[in-house]
Image (spheres, rainbow, N blue to C red):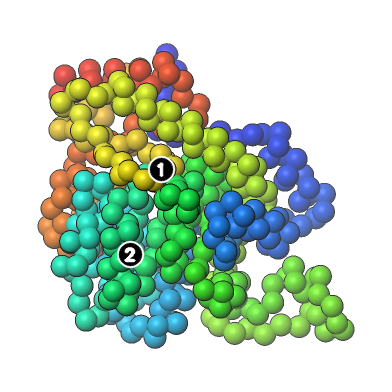
């Protein structure tokens, strides 16, 4: 039988080639052609008025921190409350800015626990970074209310949340900065790209300079601009080369057309997993709060003897994943080891089951059977 992998990107190849061909025929593959078109399309879809297309979600997170730090005049060593249950880029960007990640524990949704956030606040806390793991919104609203009451910035790491809706609002619409990933395995796939969405228009203007090495006028604007000296520009900051390009944006435009359809299919896959696994006391699922519509980027379960179970599944041609190892187990964050016992407990038991658009009902049944058989053998 064919192996079943955790992720398997599915592109609408002919439509994607047509969009990319347009870039090649116009001779414009860099920022400013399709990137502007994608930004407009994402704004219309999500309602996030200030959207900037960048080369990765990691870049977007770094830019969000840099600009909020500059705007708030934060000092080196100031603190950002964050989760240990995330991809390391969430926390690496805090270190990039010489800020200190302060780890709060997670709740049953595997998202930041508001009570733990409140416990970890100090006079040096400047922001909270909330990760919507797998598309789950957790108790985001309570964490946001806490931030507003304490005057803290809210950054939403929405790398898994393209197409997550809270009522009629897209995730991130009420954050100071929201960041989304358009990596190949994400719900809205390119090869690699992302978006950073600020609540404020002035920060949206600034981020366009910061993502283009601090230059105050991008190449596209200089090419299309009016006036006799349109090639001239100034360098306002020591910025970064984080901008996105038109080839990735072209792929993103196609993916965006199908995002709602694809997320509906993902929710169906999750329902099939629920049907197969509900009632097995050896498998604990991750709850989904009411009044929100998840992107269902991940389908996660908690099991005992996780590593042995995964090896057993591998022997049956099933290759799940782990999202994620407790970040405090890594050397740069080991100062917080043991400070988030629920996150540590979960990270030792988590399995992300295969979750992608190529899966069939029989594939889901096969994955579930491999899981239960491996549990029996562990």
Q: Residue furthest right?
A: 228
Residue position marked by numbered label 2 in the rendering = 144
Image quadrant in which the C terminus is located: top left
Residue 146, visible in the rendered structure? yes
User: Badge 1 local density, few (<14 within 10 Å), some, or many (20+)?
Assistant: many
Q: Residues within 10 Å of mark 2 (few under 14, many from 20)?
A: many
Residue ID at (19%, 67%) = 118
Q: Which comes sooner in the sequence, label 1 or label 2?
A: 2
Place of residue 220 in the rendered image (x, y in percent of width and height, measured from the top left):
74, 68
Q: Position of residue 37 (x, y in %)?
A: 69, 56
Relative horizontal placement of residue 241, taking residue 131 as reference (left or right) = right
Image quadrant holding the N terminus, namely: top left
* On screen, residue 194 above or below 286: below
- The residue where tag 1 is placed is 294
Q: Residue 127, percent across and down?
A: 33, 72
* Farthest-out residue, top: 1
Q: Nearer the viewer, residue 187 or 84?
A: 187
Q: 133 left or right of 55?
A: left
Q: Nearer the viewer, residue 17 or 117?
A: 117
Instruction: Identify the mark at residue 92; answer none if there is no mark.
Output: none
Q: Are marks 1 and 2 in contact (CB under 8 Å)?
A: no
Does dot 2 land on a helix, a strand or a loop? helix
Helix, strand or loop under label 1: loop
Is residue 101 in sight in this rendering?
no
Residue in view at x 63 percent, y 42 percent: 257
Which residue: 64% across, 78% down? Answer: 215
- The answer to whether 50 is drawn above or below residue 228 in the figure is above
Q: Residue 65, relative to residue 238: is it above or below?
A: above
Q: Residue at x 82, y 49 (%)?
A: 25
Q: Percent from the top left, x then y, of residue 239?
A: 54, 76
In the depicted view, which residue is nearer to us: 25 or 113?
A: 113
């Amino acid at each position: 039988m064919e192996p079943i992998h955790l992720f398997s990107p599915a592109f609408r190849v002919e439509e994607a080639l047509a969009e990319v061909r347009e870039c090649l025929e116009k001779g414009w593959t860099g920022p400013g052609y399709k990137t502007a078109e994608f930004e407009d399309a994402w704004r219309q879809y999500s309602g996030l008025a200030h959207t900037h297309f960048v080369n990765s979600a990691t870049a977007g997170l770094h830019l969000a921190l840099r600009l909020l730090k500059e705007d708030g005049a934060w000092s080196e060593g100031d603190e950002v409350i964050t989760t240990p249950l995330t991809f390391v880029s969430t926390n690496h960007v805090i270190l990039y800015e010489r800020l200190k990640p302060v780890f709060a524990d997670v709740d049953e949704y595997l998202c930041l626990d508001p009570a733990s956030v409140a416990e970890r606040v100090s006079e040096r806390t400047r922001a909270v970074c909330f990760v919507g793991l797998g598309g789950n919104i957790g108790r985001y609203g309570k964490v946001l209310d806490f931030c507003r009451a304490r005057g803290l910035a809210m950054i939403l790491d929405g790398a898994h949340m393209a197409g997550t809706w809270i009522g009629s609002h897209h995730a991130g619409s009420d954050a100071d900065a929201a960041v989304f990933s358009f990596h190949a395995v994400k719900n809205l796939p390119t090869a690699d790209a992302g978006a950073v969405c600020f609540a404020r228009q002035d920060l949206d203007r600034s981020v366009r300079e910061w993502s283009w090495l601090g230059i105050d006028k991008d190449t596209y604007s200089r090419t299309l601009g009016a006036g006799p000296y349109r090639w001239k520009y100034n360098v306002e900051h020591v910025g970064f080369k984080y901008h996105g390009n038109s080839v990735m944006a072209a792929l993103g435009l196609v993916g965006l057309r199908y995002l709602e359809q694809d997320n509906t299919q993902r929710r169906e896959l999750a329902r099939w997993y629920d049907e197969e696994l509900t009632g097995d006391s050896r498998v604990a699922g991750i709850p989904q709060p009411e009044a929100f519509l998840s992107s269902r980027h991940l389908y996660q379960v908690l099991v005992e003897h996780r590593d042995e179970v995964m090896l057993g599944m591998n022997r049956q041609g099933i290759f799940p994943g782990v999202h994620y190892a407790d970040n405090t187990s890594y050397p740069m964050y080991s100062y917080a080891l043991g400070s988030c016992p629920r996150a540590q407990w979960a990270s030792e038991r988590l399995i992300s089951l295969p979750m992608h658009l190529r899966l069939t009902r029989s594939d889901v049944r096969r994955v579930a059977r491999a899981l239960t058989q491996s549990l029996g053998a562990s």
